[in-house]
Structure formats: C-alpha cells, structure tokens
Amino acid sequence: MIKATGAMLSGHNCQFTVWAPFRKSVDVEFEAADLVTTRLEKDEFGYWSKEIANIKAGVRYRFILDGQQAYPDPASKAQPDGVHSWSAVVDEHDYVWGDSRWEGIALSDLIIYELHIGTFTPSGTFESAISGLDHLVELGVNAIEIMPIAQFPGNRNWGYDGVYPYAAQDSYGGHTGLKKLVDACHQKNIAVILDVVYNHLGPEGNYLAEYGPYFTGKHSTPWGKALNFDDAYSDHVRAFFLRNALTWLNDYHIDGLRLDAVHAIIDHGAYHFLKELRQCVDELQIKNRRRYFLIAESELNDVKILEPYEKGGYGIDAQWTDDFHHAIHTLATGEDDGYYLDYGKIEHLAKAFRQGFVYDGIYSPFRKKTVGNSPRIMASNRFVVCIQNHDQTGNRMLGERIAELVSFEMLKLMAGIMLISPYVPMLFMGEEYGERHPFLYFISHGDHDLIEAVRKGRSNEFRVFKWKGQVPDPQAEETYNRSKLKWDFHQDPGQKTLFTYYQYLISLRKQGMFSAFLKRNVDTEVHESQKLLIVRSKDASPGIGILLTVFNFSKEIQHIKMPAFLERWYKICASSDERWRGKGCPGKTILQKGEELALAPESMVLYKSENS
C-alpha cells in the first residue's frame, strides 16, 4: 500500500502527513497568526500525521523537525514563494474538468511534440501555452511532451533541478494552470505526456535528507548519492515516488509519463522500481478505465525495459532511441566527435531504420565496451525517435538547432526520414518551421557557489567536442530569453514552406501511407561511397502496394534504377519538389520498371508501386 503524504484537504479539515522516521518530534507550523503550531503523531513506520480543523486552500505551512529547524513539505503541491519558503495547502478538487469525452490516443498513432513551458511562448506559462495549441492542431501533432515542471529554484530552468516532485512550478501557473492546459489539450484531441525525474533531485532547496533516508550511499549517480530504491527504509522512498506518478496521472489527467534517464534509477532488489511503477499504473488503468503510457529514456539499449513481466522485463511501453538520432545527425552534419564517434555511416542509419538500435550487442568505440542487445522482437511503436530534442540541442555548447547546422534541403531530408520511419516520431518545439533561436541551458539558482559550479561544469562538459566559442552564461536571463521561440515564421517563405512540408508528411502518416514500413519488414540497400540509402518494404500495404524510399545524403545528384519486379512506380513525395522550394531533380511522377531515377543532392523521394 502506498502511504499518502503531504497536506490533504477535506472540507475545512486538513490531514498533514510526513515521513521522518528518525525524528523525535515533528510539528506543523503556520504562517497565519491565528493558526496554532501543532504536534503530529508518529506511527510504527515513521509517518507523522494529524488532522487539523479550520484549514483552507492557500494556507502556508511548514514542518518543524525536533523543535529546531523548519522546512517545506517534501510532498508540497504548491511553493508560491520559492523552494526555501512556506508550502501552501492545495484543494485538489478546485477544478471542474471539461474533458469527459476524451478517450485517448493509441501509442502507435502518437505524433509527439516536445516543449518547454518557459520558452514555448513569450509569457512562458501553462495558460499561455494554450494559445499555441491551434498551431499544433494545424500541424497535425496529437501529443505534447512537457519538459519537467516540478518546482525548481527561481523561474528559469530546464526542469531537471526540481526539488518538489508534487508541486507544479509556480512561475508557470502552478497546479491550476497545469490542469487548464491539460484540459484544453484534451478538448483539442491532444494527449499530454509529462517528463518526470526519478533518478535525482536538484541541489538547491532539496531538503529530503533532513526528513529521512531518501538517498543512499550504496550507489552514486552523476548528481551525487542515488535515491534510495533498494537500501534500508527504501519501501517508503519508493512509495513517495510511486504515489507521485499516480498523482500526475490521476489528479491532473496526464496521459503518460516520460521517465528521465532510467539507467540512473539504481535498484538491485528483486522487484525493480520500474516494474513496480508499471504495475501500479496498470492498477490505475483498471480503476479509471484509461490507458496510461510510460516512456523511458535509457542509454543502455536494453530491451529488458520493454519486455513484459513474464519474461523478466519491466513492461515499459516505449523508450527513446538515441541511435536513430545519432545516425542521422552524423550523416547530415559530418560531426564525429564525442559520442558521435560511434556513428557516421549509411549502414548505421540502415540498421536504425530496420530495428531501432544500432548498438545491439556490438562494441562501441566511444564507450569502449559492448553495448545493448537485439530489439528485433519489439514492435516498432515501442521506440520513440527524433532528429532533435532538448538534450541534443541544449547540450550543445551554443545550443544550435539543426536548422543552423545544415542546409534547407537537408532539413527536409531529415524530417522525411523521421516521419516515414516505422517508429513513433517526436518533434522538438520550433523544429516544424526551422526555428533559428538556440535552445540553451539556463538556470536561476540563488546560491552563488552553486552557480559557479554549474558554469564550470558546463565548460568542462564540452571538452570532448570540437565546438568553438564562448559558453553562454546559464545563469543570465538573456540566455533564457534567447531560447524562446519566435512565432513570426509565417513571414519567412522558407520557414512557412518547411511548416507546410511537415504538415504534409504528418498527414500522410496519419492516413496510413507509410504503413508498409511499420512492421520493419524492409530491405535496405547501402551505397556508402555515394551516401545513399534505399529502403523497400517486403510486403505490400492494402491500397498502397510496395513502398520504396531513397535518401541521398551526398551533395551530388545520384542515379538509381527502379526495381524491375513491378511494372510501375508512382511518386508520393519528394523533398526536392518545387512546392517545397526544391532545387530540381524531384523525379518523375511515374517511373517504369528498370527506369533510372535521378535524385537531387541532400534529398529524399518516396514511391509506391502498383502492378499494371
């Protein structure tokens, strides 16, 4: 059973509960002078609780430990004055939902759009993000993935420095603003995925260790001591985070969770935290008669994360597939330093298209070890792919988006690969029109020493790459402002065309035009010296036939002969068409068997076949 902690309001009474097993006393203190500090009562597991009368939503409170220091509530649902100050009582039933007709979207049908609340709109709030939903509907997106919104220090952060997992960032609009955004999404038939962080907490305002053994010295992570998922007292730490996941799904109507860096969730117990999380979510699905997605980020390339319980897996629905991004990025940009050392060949992209993982039990030169296992048994909708995301953009020294790194023609080629691929596609905000503003790393910490440590750490991080320039100051407000989207793209002919191109490919995907690729039953033909990849479906799709697509990463026109086993090939789309501001050689509308196709530099073309 998962013990509920925090301030739970019921009418005019509020139950205050906190886990602090080693403390001799815990009192709840109120900011309001007319509310009396009250001693909580301890149970056998170290939970302190008491129901207190005459408490209203908005009342500020904090816990006094052993009659000495006062701290905010670890399970606070609102921190209106920041991470170091009073927590606020929230009425969980203060919002009237309007999404009763929402039925959700199947995982295989998702077209995800990753966004950061603070930089998606000029105002940077949940409610202002609602104004951008019509743009997403017009584009064809049917799911947004929101970067972490758990309360963090200051008002500028990617979200991975959150320290109150239950509290929606106050500067974004808090719990009510988040509910309004989710409700608006559902009414526009858009699913909502929330990025959550269960591998660490941020350094500033992190008071969990004051309450109990939330961290363990048994394991370490890039952020310090690991969260305690398998050491003494870990049952209660696990419960804290399991309940957090269920809270987002149940109380905020979130459709799925993206689990950050699950390889850093260290649990050597017999019942891994991820498996327990999936099973808790399964129970909630039965109760609410709704489907909830769990999507993992992992660098392990291990299908155990996706495999069902009966095979010893964790049952997670899908995972990000970095190999797909890296294979495309290296071919498009020519970058080969850092972890890009492991990629750069057409064969890498061919393998990624066939099965998702490039590193499936083979040696990685960059990591200097064998990485991964075979994903071939997994359905294609178990993998989420992209050509850019917050990590691959923001963790560049200058935060350049792909539109700043490659030509307009190459942008269309890359988009074509992602949207034609058999996997669940994910766009990063602004990608659909070629946003040129960078997406930089930014913070607004209050601790001077921590700020300096972050600055130094960012500089050291880029030593394995060949990037040149000055690292933007992550603490500077200008760094944050530079990362905001520009919404005037309709005034730029190239950006407007790119948006229409994305829109067209997404519409084809939603119509099932690329369905012959979905089972990954494809043949790939690699021409390494010509930087050319040909992909053909082995089976015909009803009403469409055999699909043939050619990707030309070279800067030269390439010539290929159409397969001779079918009479005619009909063009579906070509990135070099004039309608997409192409530079010619778009290929004929109809090609006969054995006829030659001339493919423009840095372009892709897709044909379907029908017998005469």
Image (cartoon, rainbow, N blue to C red):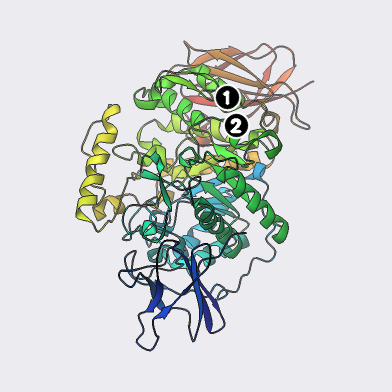
**Residue in front for this viewpoint, 343 or 298:** 298
Q: Amino acid at mark 1?
A: Asn
The answer to whether one can see residue 465 in this image is no
- The residue positioned 52% from the left and 68% from the top of the image is 43
- The residue positioned 53% from the left and 23% from the top of the image is 358
Residue 170: horizontal and vertical position, in percent? 40, 66
Residue 196: horizontal and vertical position, in percent? 49, 51
- Cβ–Cβ under 8 Å for marks 1 and 2: yes
The answer to which of marks 1 and 2 sits earlier in the sequence is 2
User: In 3D space, how far apart are the residues under numbered discs 1 and 2 (Cα atoms)?
Assistant: 7 Å
Q: On the image, which quarter does residue 505 sit in?
A: top right
The answer to whether one can see residue 233 in this image is yes
Residue 514: horizontal and vertical position, in percent? 66, 33
On-image quarter of the N terminus: bottom right
Does residue 125 appear left or right of residue 255 in this picture? left
State the residue position of label 1.
373
Secondary structure beneath disc 1? loop
- Residue 303 shows which numbered tag? 2
Q: On the image, which quarter does residue 25 sit in?
A: bottom left
Graded by Cα atoms within 10 Å as few (under 14), some (14 to 19) or many (20 or more), the crowding at tag 2 reads many
Residue 266: horizontal and vertical position, in percent? 48, 40
Graded by Cα atoms within 10 Å as few (under 14), some (14 to 19) or many (20 or more), the crowding at tag 1 reads some
**Residue in front for this viewpoint, 454 or 181:** 454
Does residue 271 appear left or right of residue 164 in this picture? right
